[in-house]
Amino acid sequence: MPLPLEGVRVLDLTNVMAGPYCSMVLGDLGAEVVKLESLEGDSTRNFEPKVNDESYCFAVLNRNKRSISVDLKAPAGKEVVTRLAREADIVIENFRPGVVKKLGIGYEDLKRVNPGLIYASMSGFGQDGPYGRKGGFDIIAQGMSGIMMMTGHPGGRPAKVGIAMNDIACGVTTLYGILGAFIGKLRHGEGRYLETSLLEAGLAWSIWEFSAYFGSGELPTPTGTRHRRSAPYQAFRSKDGYVTVGASGDKLWRAFASAVCEKPEWLDDPRFATNPLRVRNADALEAEIEKVLATQTTAHWIGKLDAAGVPGGPVYTYDQALADPQVQHRRMVVDMDHPRIGAMKTLGLPVKSEGELTAIRKPAPLLGQHSREVLRELGYADGDVAALIAQGVVKATEA
């Protein structure tokens, strides 16, 4: 059975994280992704660590793509993009708003040569509005979406989420926008333009906080590892580390208090009688629970939690997470070969399915590794390809 997007052609004009994540997943789904890079290449090619002068970060994020390196400011470079867009089903870009129009490769420009094109733009704040011309990075969007002011521990400084959350949120949001537009094209025969931003994508994930603000005027503040609406639902200190517990429902709370902690008297404590009361008295609840959990190891408590049917787990360092037997069983760490790095690890495919839905088919490309190949596919004669390379319009690298 072919992959679902097999034969779908994607022209990827994106850089760094949000856009490349989106195009990587499209590639995992089977799309033919051509990553068009500047002559200097995607800026993440400079990220450490490097192996044999190739960025490991770039290699993990850009599998299942081919690379062509082009000077977009040169008229002949613009012509390459136009030819690629004429053959593409999807174009993705994350330049600062206004740049693609200035370069002559915006949606209206490319729609003239390919009316059925799906064209997706990503930006820091959106293509219009008072900040529509500003650039933006993940940390800026985390700050402006309110996320940093609700992350961390009470009384601490604003904290960034440990991963590039708004970048990934923007990549995922663009991905479902593209897939929705593509389904619409299959049904109705029309392409379309769509756009989102780091700011909006992050805000769209703040469901409970939005609800509480408009429902009661509550401003979300840092709660450490606690849930805003449920308790006990957090990480608690054990004898040798931390253990997470999700026991907010009445049935789970009874099992946790009686079978795990062996404190049935908690069930009669008026402070803990209902979930809203446990949330309201979370400080006292945490103190009582940690008196118990601090007497034994995390492994001990996970055994008791599992036996009682109460969700719980260890709080891992990242190396421990990757080495966990469940993570290994689910193949979230995969071996592959890279043309310059050699044997390497890459993140596995998070969606499992009956029949092949996604696949890691090829490693990330070297800068301009497929320039000659892609240009020939576009109809350029060998002499024209050589001329573009000699003129510095195109960079080509041999694997």
Image (cartoon, helix red, strand yellow):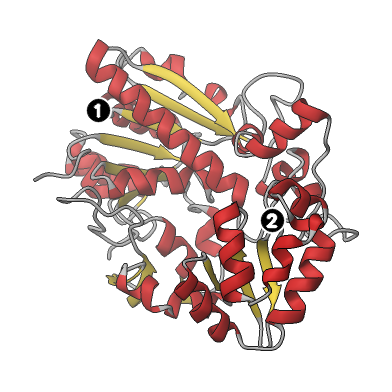
Question: Is 2 on the left or on the right of 288, as rendered?
Answer: left
Going by the picture, which residue comes out furthest to the left? 1
Rendered image: mark on residue 87: 1
Which of the 4 image quarters holds residue 376?
A: top left
Between discs 2 and 1, the one toward the N terminus: 1
**Residues at marks 2 and 1 touching, judged by CB atoms closer than 8 Å:** no
The x, y position of residue 249, in whole percent, is 59, 52
Residue beneath label 2, please?
231
Question: Is 360 on the left or on the right of 326, as rendered?
Answer: left
Going by the picture, which residue comes out furthest to the right? 155
> At numbered mark 1, what does the secondary structure look like: helix, strand or loop?
helix
| Residue type for callout 2 | Ala
Q: Nearer the viewer, mark 2 or mark 1?
A: 2
Q: Choose between 85 and 252: the one closer to the eye.
A: 252
Rendered image: mark on residue 388: none
The x, y position of residue 302, in whole percent, is 52, 78
Q: Residue at x 43, y 28 (%)?
A: 177
> At numbered mark 2, what does the secondary structure look like: helix, strand or loop?
loop
Rate crowding at label 1 as few (under 14), some (14 to 19) or many (20 or more) other CA atoms within 10 Å. Answer: some
Question: Is 181 on the left or on the right of 150, as rendered?
Answer: left
Q: Choose between 104 and 115: the one closer to the eye.
A: 115
| Residue type for callout 1 | Glu
Relative to 127, say whether 243 is above or below: below
